[in-house]
Amino acid sequence: MQTNTKILAQEFEYLSPKTIDEALDLLDKYKDKNIKILAGGTDLLVKMKTIDLKIDYLINIKNISELNFVDTNQGLRIGAVTPLSHIIREEKVKMKYSALYEGIMSIAAPAIRNMGTMAGNLGNASPAADTVPPLIAYGAEVKLQGKRGERTVLVEDFIIGVGKTIIKPNELITEINIPQINKNIGSAFLKKSRVKADLSKINLAIYLKREGNICKDCKIVFGSVAIKVLRAEKTENLLKGQIVNSELINKVAEKASCEIKPIDDIRSTAEYRIAMSKEMLKDGFELAWARAKD
Amino acid sequence: MRKIPIEFSINGQEREALVNSNDLLINILRDDLYLTGTKYGCGIGECGACTVFLNNEPILSCLTLAAAVDGKEITTIEGLAKGNELHPMQIAFLKNAAVQCGFCTPGMILTAVALLKENPSPTEEEIKDYMRGNLCRCTGYVQIVKAIKTCAEGGENESI
Amino acid sequence: MLEKKQFDVIGKRFDIKNIGKVTGEEVYSCDVNIPGQLYAVVLRSPYSHAEIKKIDYTEAEKMGAICIGPDDVPDTLYNERIVSIPDKTYRDRTVLPKDKVRHVGEAITACAAETEEKAFTAIKKIKVEWGRKWKPVVTLDDAMDSNASAIYDHVYLGEKKVDVKNNLACERNIAVGDVEEGFKEADIIVDETFNIKRIYHMQLETKSTVCKPEANGGITLWTTTQGIHNVRILLGHIFNISLSKINVKRITLGGSFGSSIQMNSITPICVALALKAKKPVKLVTSREEDMYDHSSYPLKTRLKVGVKKDGTLTAAHCQVWVEIGGHNIQAYPYLGCVAGWFASLYKWKNIKYEGKAIYSNKGPSCARRGYGSPQINFPVENTMDILAEKLGVDPVHFRLQNYVGRGDEFWGQGPTVKSIIRSCGVEEMLVKGVELIGWDKRGNPDEKSGTIRKGIGVARGFHTSGTGGPRAGEVIDYSGATVKINEDGSVDVITALMDHGGGTWDAGAKVVAEVLKVPFEKISIDNGVDTRTTVFDVNTHATRGIYCGCGAIKFVAEKVKEMLLNYAATLFEDRPENLDLALNQELSQGVIYPKGLPENYKTIGEIADHARINSVETFSYTSTLRQKNCPPCFITYFTEVEVDTRTGEITIPRVVMLGDSGTIINPELWKGQILGAYALGLGVGKLESIPYDKVTGKLKCNGFITDFKVPTTIDMPNIDDIIVDHAHTYEPTGPFGAKGIGEAALSAVASSFGNAVYNAIGIRFHELPITPEIMLKALEEKEIGGKVRNAN
């Protein structure tokens, strides 16, 4: 199948709603057609060019101003089409949501971060997405709005496979909600890639709640090691409630490397990913642990 | 496929156009407006050669639909200089031998200008990190980083 | 031996004239637009080796597209690179394949239409009926297997028909002395095999051609090329059009690194479409097409070297194999050059070289910056380190003892081009580099501990400045120029010499400025020239831009100087030898005055205008020049690496880069060449390769650079951690003492990297790239004490 990345060869109808309601109306009107939502375009247009993804209707939601906001009052509320680069400009994100900040900063390059959005990242549901592990680690929720109402789902439950989410055809991602970060919480994001601007070979978000020497709670989330971003729950259980020492961390790292299910692909090998998961767990833990000590 | 009317400003000039839904911004710029400074390098967002400013922020025109720039301001490399007066970043690139074949240069310069807007005194590490999405095969980047650093430090302000 | 020269312009730093490149006004081939042009797209083969039975264009033509297929283009069998003499040029290709395709991505047919989108839709409507399909022959071993499908039955070498057996495209065997005797004399023998894989040039500008058919049946062409005249000659030959009707414009090139020495495969396709459509046609390849179109030559090397206890080399037996893809662009001269790069690095005393080039079902390989030098430098420089270790001597001393240098005979371009080295900075660079990097503190691998291990490696290389020799040989090598003094004292330099961005045009202008004492800003060497207005220049390749290209320009400028002085003499009523020519900065003019009376000057502008007003003449001269030498420009790298043994990642904290180019005409751009090459070499060392799938014959990355990663800003060391310095030499045969640097700069990068890695962790890698995955695995194997990829 010959490609031509100089142009977009597909023919489709382009629609650009200005409000959420308008968008929902369009989703309803064309529900039997092949619709794709355009946010930043950095994933969708690449797919259209490289694997000849066919669509009938392209709905550009980037111009819906109601979906472009960052609200730092209670926790973090991020509008679905807020450019990723705008999210990290918020002082609160840099200071309190380290894993999210680091995750977004690890993405490609500034131009891509200016174009990319959370809606895009979540909707695209790539196992390599860099925003997803931090979101899951923070227990973030995604709000989905349909004509008949809205619902909120944990990001962790939203993505179910490669490119697969539980979004219904008439629904729109409207915002992502991340709970407030209180004291004694630390988080970190790590990533291994061929070059720094690359997709991940493996990435990791860690979220810790610390009480003195005890790890009261934790979330350990790996990307690029399974068909979807993986919460290493068995590994978490080994750590939760335990007194932290280096012996424990080594055990936890070992457990993590067994819990992930990576494959060999063009970016890396399963063997390497497994080896890195250990090192990254140790490094990530150390970082997050230090950050949890206010 | 119906044509879509758009209004946008390009390098400070207001323009109207009738575009196809699948027209890419890079091709409207290069083929219709004859602004060939913006380059096709890979078409998939990996090389940065097609960088332009959209509402003063760098984006990749190879992954941007023309229809999506309706109501927006576009600045290409051609819009950086003020008449005959080169932008300090352009001067810095010339004076620091940061230009060899020149194909990556428009994207590099625009990205660098955006960097200094966001961070007027970047460290070398910050410069390298910000520019990591602009590929160059000729210079090895060192003189480019030096040019950006020099520009940030306020040197090289005379015109050529 | 140094000659201190006081130059007005040479070696001085000027603001680079490339203003168009920073404003977006610089025009590259892909930027050319001709009113009424059609856009062309090429239909490419999805199969690696398949017979074409029939092509049906009906649906495409119904759309209104102009289509061309094998029956619409001439039958001419040619080689797209005509730098070698015809007798030594293998020919195996036609404009479009008539019988079968030989690699995925090979052009089958092409369409032109009013929009690119329409042309792309049209090619998808073309129906190709395929016949027999063969299993792809992808790896070197597959290709050499006696059961491998035959990619060619026969090809032509010059006018001779040559049968192709076992996919052997060509071979080259060279012997000097008697290696067996040499090995007998040796106390230590090292015999190792190394492998350098295919790399994609990833020049930023993809290949393009714009062709405008002219009313007289001729064509005007803008295309990505390193040599406009060869494109013209080839097109004239293929399409049977008089060269006087073909005009190829010289236009800025968006990087090349050797990928446009040959006429690009799309060029005659574009011409055929333009001639058929009777309209201008623009053909710009996509990045994914470009990656199938050309890549570097890989090289597998088995190198056996003998040395005496006292460190004298006694013999070297070098066997190389290279799989070259589906077309033979320049494998024969490649084998010769590889022999030359190998033979001329050290005094081997007795040499045996056996080189084989084998066809495979991959995109054709072509020259990439260094043309085999980086590929063979890696085995040689690794072997030198191995030998030094076995001898218990310092690797730098060992190199100093054995390098081919000043006064030695050298045949860098192959066995038919021998000369004596006249300028050489090798010793200066090794001695200086040792100081600058802190060589003596580098330690031994087994002394090192901790998770982060540092190591320093040295490697040296060279390249010939062009391909000139005492007698014209297998490679055509000459350049020419017209230099013309304008009526105001400014100067036009009209040359077909290309500039890849390394400053060749700047250098040409400086050379003329230095000869004629005209200010640099008043020399134009700009675009706006073409095959019609320029005399022949073979190509800007082989690091010949300065030594050969500017050498020719200097020769012509000297003739113009003579004319100018002769005329000035009539005005001063004196003899030309009693006049002086100097640059007057204040007036921004060259001036001529009687010796001893500088105040009685006339400006060149006045003199030239006098000649005009009196209807006498224009001071202009046109000629070509063949250099009879190709003096080596040398490079030495001292690379420091840092290996993270937990993650396998390698970074470069420091590097010292030393070059010997004789007089350095453009210091900043010279530095830029070396820095740029270093990044390319790092890519070879730790990142780049373009593997093909053995089953489908497709590139594993499908041509998308998503999975062909090249170094970015972050991969280079910080500014303060890089030292670039030069040797103080002067090449007496070069323009103002200058030699080249472009390809020398890449020759030893990966080698210094590999040697540094060994010094850090005690593992020698025989194959590149060293990715973190490979490094980690090797570290684990070493720990376990199992198989160690170590020469010892």
Image (spheres, coloured by chain):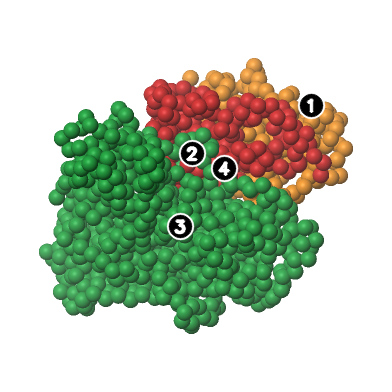
Image point (20%, 37%), residue name: C594
Pointer 2 residue = C21
Distance of mark 2 from mark 1, alpha carbons? 42 Å
User: Helix or strand or loop: what does disc 2 sit on?
Assistant: helix
Distance of mark 2 from mark 4, alpha carbons? 12 Å
Distance of mark 1 from mark 4, alpha carbons? 34 Å
Pointer 4 residue = B39
Residue C279 horizontal side relative to residue C149, left or right: right
* Amino acid, disc 2: Lys
Q: Nearer the viewer, mark 3 or mark 4?
A: 3
* Amino acid, disc 1: Thr
Q: Nearer the viewer, mark 2 or mark 3?
A: 3
* Amino acid, disc 4: Lys
Image point (37%, 38%), residue name: C609
Q: Which chain is green?
A: C
Q: Which chain is orange?
A: A
Label 1 is found on which chain of the structure?
Answer: A
Q: Which chain is red?
A: B
Q: Nearer the viewer, mark 2 or mark 1?
A: 2
